[in-house]
Image: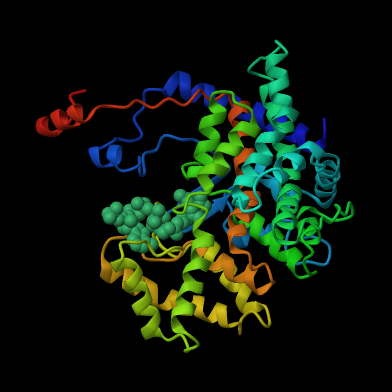
Amino acid sequence: MTQLKEKLFEKIQAHRPRITKLTKEFGSVVIDKVDIGQCIGGARDIRSLVTDISYLDPQEGIRFRGKTIPETFEALPKAAGSEYPTVESFWYFLLTGEVPTLEQVAAVEAEFKTRQVVPEYVYTVVRSLPKDSHPMVMLSVGIMAMQKESKFAAFYSGGKFNKMDAWEYVYEDASDIVARIPVLAAFIYNLKYRGDKQIAIDPKLDLGANFAHMIGQSEQYKDVARMYFILHSDHESGNVSAHTTHLVHSALSDPYYAYAAGLNGLAGPLHGLANQEVLGWIMEFQKKLNGAEPTKENVTKALWDTLNAGQVVPGYGHAVLRKTDPRYTAQREFCLKTPGLKDDALFKLVAMIFETAPGVLTEHGKTKNPWPNVDAQSGVIQWYYGLKEWDFYTVLFGVGRALGCMANITWDRGLGYAIERPKSVTTDMLEKWAAEGGRKM
Ligand code: NMX
Ligand code: MLT
């Protein structure tokens, strides 16, 4: 067992009795109620999932393992010569809840080197797709094609499956997926936008730096990749990509099936695809300006045009958050401290939208949260560094989100969580309970 796997085993063993006690002794303690609005309205706010990996407070935003974003970046060991931690150190932290030592980080980096090679047949499958397929299709198909590597599936079909050991095989698949997904994403980028000019893995580099290297990016972009993947990793368990991954894996579908499904959810415009939509919206706006300077007045008009056309303003609003997303703030601060970027015209426009959109959305009066989410700021950074193919932005989100989804399903198996199966009701039933003032329990 690697150091990380041993540490994880220790943590899982220590945690198991807590779940057993809660289920056996306190299983009938009520923690929430469900109303008709929630039943029809996307199960909003119903407390029915458990994770210790991250928690999203509506006012404060995300905490990873109890730490805010600035605390996380502060606490973790940094990549050599960088202000940012490596993705490997963050992976250790997400899985175990402990800040790793430099030696523990080096061990994860070494482990990832042995895992990161994507089998050649996966590239053949992805290459056979039409070149104008969306890169999220390519990513999802690539992960799905790799399913035959699944150690969990082999363990299950080998006839020796048992609940106590199953997490070990999920850990193996999860680690393979986390180590390989940036390599697959870089392959897709080069295939789609660089005439299939592929760049080999540099085995000396950490995960984020190697991704930058493999897409032909600059030295500075290495930190962008590290920051981006960490920021997008996890957002507790109810969001579409994490929930889908958890749901599919709850049927004991292996991590490849589960994460391909999660990616398919991430590809929706109300979820991860919003980062592509933001850039699309900005480009459309600039086209309409026809060379004129953006002003608060013309930004306001463009926002109203979108709303009056019955569309959503991409990058604004959130199902849980009720303030500016701290992932937005972290990226905005990155822009403000990066010479060149803080004076970039696109950054200034995004900042102007930030000044304008909350007021317009409040006046519009529909959204419960007029503030920006992660997607409103992420594209401008990519654009500045020359990654201008905005239909690729959700793939970057998907690489980061693998960290959270894979850590979560490893723990799901460690704690033996049940197959997910909520109950549905009919409209007749809802109408009856509405007339009676509630369901008689
Ligand atoms: N622009 C216009 N209308 C909005 C917006 C927005 N940005 N956000 C919410 N609304 C509307 C929403 O469509 C709904 O309208 P209706 O009653 O006609 O159905 C109403 O406001 C109430 O919605 P909320 O309860 O505030 O939001 P909900 O929890 O249903 O949805 C989002 C959350 C994130 C899907 C929604 O805010 C949205 O569509 N935002 C724009 C897309 C986006 O940025 N998504 C990315 C989310 C983060 N991520 O990466 O996943
Ligand atoms: C996410 O990162 O998953 C999004 O902000 C959506 C969510 O949390 O619902």
Q: Quadrant of the C terminus?
A: top left
Q: Is residue 290 above or below residue 363?
A: below
In this rendering, the answer to whether 397 lies above or below 173 is below
15 to 402, vertically: above or below: above
Q: Position of residue 419 (x, y in %)?
A: 50, 23
User: Which of 229/297 is in front?
Assistant: 297
Nearest to the observer: residue 399 or residue 28: 399
Colour mapping used in the image: rainbow
Residue 310 found in image quarter = bottom left
Q: Residue at x 35, y 44 (%)?
A: 44
- Number of numbered discs: 0
Residue found at the very far bottom of the displayed protein = 292
The outermost residue toward the left is: 435
Q: Nearer the viewer, residue 44 or 200?
A: 200
Residue at image point 85% right, 52% down: 201
Residue 213 lies in quadrant: bottom right
The answer to whether residue 326 is seen in the rendering is no
Place of residue 282 in the rendered image (x, y in percent of width and height, measured from the top left): 49, 72
The x and y percentages for residue 428 are: 17, 28
Q: Quadrant of residue 116?
A: top right
Residue at image coords 67%, 61%:
227
